[in-house]
Structures are given as structure tokens and as C-alpha cells.
Amino acid sequence: MVEGPNLLREALAAGWAVEAEFGPPGWEPISDAPRFVLADGVLERVAATEHPQPPLAVVRLAPSRLDLELAGLVLVLDRVADPGNLGTILRSAEAAGVDGVVLTPGCADLTSPKVVRSSAGAVFHVPTRQCSAADVAAAGFRLIGTSSHATTDHRDLDWSGRCAIVLGSEAHGVDPDLPVDEWVTIRHHGRAESLNVAMAATLLVFAAQASRGQPRGRTTSDRPSFAAPGEPS
């Protein structure tokens, strides 16, 4: 289920198939899919947000698109259960140009409305795969675990080659039994023992890409807007 015109345009731009649109009387459909008019007040009752914008759309779930054999830098999420964090991680992964995100068993549902919203549409663009960390290691990746107790600063690590950044659950961190090759930490000041997992992911993917010599991307002002006239982009 996709809610609102901006997210639906992102799904269409990424090539996802829309199966149906639902909206109140007088709404302007976004796609060519079958459309269904809802009675007054129904949209507010069935939408996930408090003040929904039409339409609600049913979008066909795309198959897994992450080919580990062709990837060079991926994120591996170990039981990241908060949908807001998962969506933000997908958004940062897209912004940094990461090849894909692996979701291990126990992660939040990729299709959760909160994941879709917090990803700002990145969920439609970032290649994902559901498998185990062991599968990623077997594909030839060097697994780099993150821990507040590690001694190696993430800025001092050699990020060359095929790397998989492993981020753990909000409550328990990375499972120590995973086949991690090296451990890094993000050094910080203050009283907090560790950073929010989505914030940590953001810092790590941009640092890794900078170390790997990733070409600079475009600025946010260069990004095409999918907002209709009069809508915030």
C-alpha cells in the first residue's frame, strides 16, 4: 500500500506496477491503473497517516533485485526491527550510492507503510535481498561489523574491495555469532553509548564511499521533483 501522490510517483518512476488507486470524489489519479472512488471520510479511516493525501494505491511487490555477485558495497541489517530506522537506512543507502541492502530474518517488513514513508521513496529504488549474513559472506564479501566496543575507528579502516557493513538491532547490536571479519566503531563525545542505527548507517556508508573514491553525486537541487504543481516536493 502506497499513500500520497509523491510516493506513488516515486514507485512509478522506479518501474513498479500499480494495480489500483483509491481516492475521494474529485481526486486526480496518478497512474493508469483501475481507480475506485471512496465515500467522504473513508480515506481518513483506512490510511496510515493522520491527515492523508490521496491517493491510496496498491502497488505490486517487486522481486528481489540485489545480485550479490555484481555488488561491491552493501549494507547487512541484523534484526533491525524499527520500520522508521529501516526506511531511513534505505534513504541513506540510496543517497550514498550503495549497491543494495540485505535484510536478515527479524528485520522490519519492507512493505510497512512507515518504512515506505520514512524511506522517502528509496524503498522503490534501492535493490534489496532477504537472506542471512552467512549468505553474504559466502558470496565473497568482507563483513565489517559495527560495535560501540570495537577499537578500530571507522575512518581508519581499509574500505577497498567487496565490503558488507553489518548493522545490528536497536536493542542488542550485531549478533557476535555472525561471520564478521572486522569490527569498527564510530567515535563520539557525550554520554550516549552508541548512535541510533539509522544515523550510524548514514555516517558509515558515506565514509566508506569516500574512502573507496566514489564519484561525487549530484546535489539535492539537481534531483528531479515528482511533486505536482502546488505540492511540496
Image (spheres, rainbow, N blue to C red):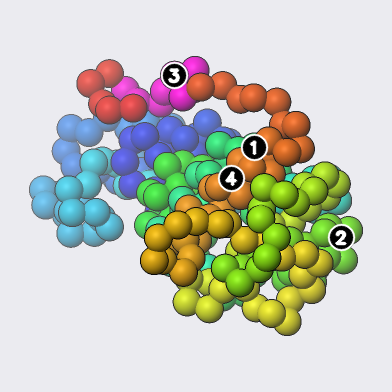
State which quarter of the image contains the C terminus.
Answer: top left
Give residue 97's mark.
1
Residues packed near mark 2 inside 10 Å, few (<14), some (14 to 19) or many (20 plus):
some
- The answer to the question of whether label 1 and label 2 lie on touching residues, with beta carbons closer than 8 A, is no
User: What's the residue type where badge 2 is placed?
Assistant: Ala
Q: Earlier in the sequence, mark 1 or mark 2?
A: 1
Q: Quadrant of residue 46?
A: bottom left
Residue 25 colored magenta?
no
**Viewer-closest of 83 and 17:** 83
**Badge 3 or badge 4: first in the primary sequence:** 4
The image position of residue 131, as x and y in percent, is 71, 67
27 left or right, relative to 100 = left
* Start-end of magenta stretch: 220-228
Which quadrant of the view contains residue 147? bottom right
* Residue ID at (77%, 70%): 180
Residue 49 in the image: state x and y as whole percent: 24, 54
Q: Earlier in the sequence, mark 3 or mark 2?
A: 2
Most common secondary structure along the magenta stretch? loop
Looking at the image, which residue is at 46% across and 69% down?
193
Is residue 189 toward the left or the right of residue 150 in the image? left
Of residues 59 and 184, which is closer to you in this image?
184
Q: Which residue is mark 4?
A: 93
Residue at the disc numbered 2: 139
Could you tell me if the residues under marks 3 and 2 are in contact, i.e. CB atoms within 8 Å? Answer: no
The x, y position of residue 114, in whole percent, is: 37, 57
**198 over 174 or under it: above or below:** above
